[in-house]
Amino acid sequence: MTTVDLPLLPLGRGRDLSAERGVECPGDLPAASDPDLVKRAEAAKAALGDRVFVLGHHYQRDEVIQFADVTGDSFKLARDAAARPDAEFIVFCGVHFMAESADILTGPDQQVVLPDLAAGCSMADMARLTQVETAWEAMAAAGVQAQVVPVTYMNSSADIKAFCGRNGGVVCTSSNAQTALEWAYEQHGPDTKVLFLPDQHLGRNTAVLQLGLSLEDCVVWDPHRPNGGLTEQQLRDARMILWKGHCSVHGRFSADVVDALREADPEIQILVHPECSHDVVLKADLVGSTEFIIKTIQAAPAGSSWAIGTELNLVKRLADSHPDKRIAFLDRNVCYCSTMNRIDLPHLVWALESLVDGVVVNRIEVDAETERWALVALERMLALPGRTAKD
């Protein structure tokens, strides 16, 4: 299925459970201009008490983050939810795949709510299960499937995680991608290959810069081209088969902006996420996960100058929290994560007030079979040495 094959969802109506999409929002949202939204959120949260646990991803708006019980990246938040078994409702202010992970890791009596079903992830949508199964069959036809270990980034749908679980693979985060790939390459000896889903940039950057593979060792599988745009010989020669997917935010950063910033300020330090393209990562001073970026800025000396390549809500929050440092966004244009920003205060108030009224809206439920195999892949990751709890 290609992008043009996706069913049309008129704004505000319908949902597509096979994708990181869905815009159904039953009920009436409070007006964004309502001056009492903050008070209404506070009152609803107080009424629910310990029955509700609100998770806020780092890329969320400030208006939403203020009501989060904990903040963090996707996997950390899912584990935080699992550590609160007495919370009846988990309200995940993030995107769809994150809420799925929370549902997988929490207990059967806990209900995960996503305030707006339109909060999906374009990267996760770039690897759909039918596409991945087609690629897997092509690898069998090329005679290499038995040597391929599928590794999926946390930023993927539950059914892709389950695919990895069923086929001897593992989930990784941006913090432990190196460890996950090292584990993968130990599975079938020197002939092992990795299918890395769905972000080609994290896979390439980790393989080349941390594992010492060459760019020639990597090929890109394009699900919109016959046989992924690759010959069987290319599949046999490759050590890393990268899925053609990317983050719509991190993919915007460019090497020429890095050059321009260094020319304007020779003291500036470039700090980027490994979802950025390879040429940007090569020009950066430091590369790491969202948690790494936050800790780096927290530890940086006063007066230091930084340009950060990650989502703008977080960069702005870091700049506001560290006025003693010069912090800039690594792009010429303002660019928020459009789907992450769908979680706004009106949707949060609506979700919380609905729970107060005894109505569970936008519940995210992963079917038992998918949950079973996705959990296998997640547990393999948790068994890896080193850092497994952070993105």
Image (cartoon, helix red, strand yellow):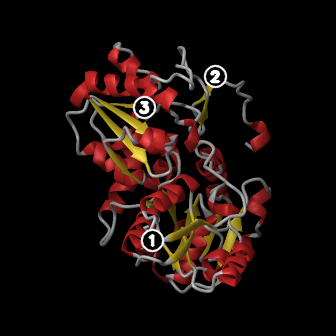
Looking at the rendered structure, the kind of residue marked 1 is Ala
Residue type pointed to by label 3: Glu
Q: Is residue 236 visible?
A: no
Q: Position of residue 113 (x, y in %)?
A: 41, 30
Which residue matches tag 2? 14
Disc 3 secondary structure class: loop
* Tag 1 residue: 184
- Residue 313 is labelled as none
Cα distance between the residues tagged 3 and 2: 17 Å
Q: Position of residue 67 (x, y in %)?
A: 37, 37
Is 42 or 361 nearer to us in this picture? Answer: 42
**Residues at badges 3 and 2 in contact (C-beta under 8 Å)?**
no
Q: Label 2's element?
A: loop
- Would you place residue 48 above or below residue 187 in this image? above
Q: Left or right: where does residue 326 sit relative to residue 99? A: right
Q: Earlier in the sequence, mark 1 or mark 2?
A: 2
| Position in image of residue 268 (x %, y %) | 58, 80
Residue at (46% x, 64% y) in the render = 323
Mark 2 Cα shell of 10 Å, populated few (<14), some (14-19), many (≥20): some
Across and down, in percent, residue 349 comes to 44, 25
In the foreground, 95 or 343: 343
Quick one: label 1 or label 3, which is nearer the N terminus? 1
Give the distance between the C-alpha atoms of the residues marked 1 and 3, in whole angstroms. Answer: 29 Å
Task: Determine crowd level at label 1: few under 14, some 14-19, many 20+ residues with C-alpha closer than 10 A.
Answer: many
Left or right: 349, with 254 as reference point: left
Q: Mark 2 or mark 3, which is nearer the start of the sequence?
A: 2
Q: Residue under circle 3? A: 365
- 3D distance between C-alphas at marks 1 and 2: 39 Å
Question: Residue at 39% of width from left, 22% of height from top?
Answer: 40
Q: Which quarter of the figure is the C terminus placed in?
A: bottom left
Nearer to me, 10 or 48: 48
